[in-house]
Image (cartoon, grey):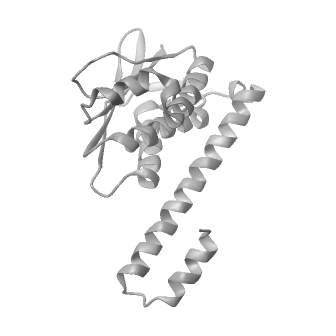
Amino acid sequence: MTDGALKELTRELPKDSPDATKLTQMMARSSQRLLLLGDRLSSLAKLMDGSDLERSDAVDLTGLVKDAANRAFTAHARRNLQLRVDGPAVPAVLHSQTFAAAVSELTALFCSFSQNELFVRVSSTADALRIEFESDNTDDSVQRALLDRASTTQANAGIAFAEAVLARHQGSIELPEAPGRRACLSLLLPR
């Protein structure tokens, strides 16, 4: 259903009806998802032509991660799911638009299988910057699906996109095998 059709349906319903509220929420989510898709396409184009390397920004990595994760969370999360993003301010130099798109991709991926909470942590060591995504889902099949990227299209696309962005920053993805523990994935960036 298009946004125009949703708007038309909303106009026909009483403003205070539950159906009108649901349609309004659907329109808002639809708009958020379209914005994220536009960011992803723009970032993919820059990755392909190399223009993402032309300009890097000095940013607060934690702030960038919080903004990108919150945008994806707003578009993809179910009502009962909570997002927690924490970490100290961490200065970094990177192409902020493509990196934010990668964080959004992974947040959307983790929203798809988290049950109640999704954690995103930013930390820093002398050698590397780490962004860790952790789900409250302890089902071993979720971590196996992340490890076996061919198993799901969404995991494959989201992780492949993040890997391409990280490769431009000489970074990597760490997917620990942790049976019986929460599903997790870390992005590592060299200092």
Q: Position of residue 102 (x, y in %)?
A: 53, 33
Front residue of 108 and 97? 108
> Quadrant location of residue 117?
top left
- Residue located at (35% from left, 54% from top): 78
Left or right of 101 on screen, residue 132 = left
Camera-side residue: 105 or 148? 148
How many marks do you count on the picture?
0
Taking the image as shown, residue 57 lies to the left or right of residue 74, namely right
The residue closer to the viewer here, 171 or 179, is: 179
Q: Is residue 114 at all visible to an observer of this figure?
A: yes
Identify the residue shown where x is 27% and y is 18%: 178
Residue drawn 44% across the image and 51% down it = 76
Residue 34 location (% of width, % of height): 60, 55
Q: Note whether residue 122 is visible.
A: no
104 versus 10 height, above or below: above
Residue 136: which quarter of the image? Answer: top left
Report the residue that reaches farthest toward the left.
Answer: 180
- Left/right placement of residue 141 relative to residue 15 reads left
Residue drawn at 57 percent across, 34 percent down:
96
For the N terminus, the image quarter is bottom right
Q: Residue furthest right?
A: 49
Q: Position of residue 190 (x, y in %)?
A: 48, 13
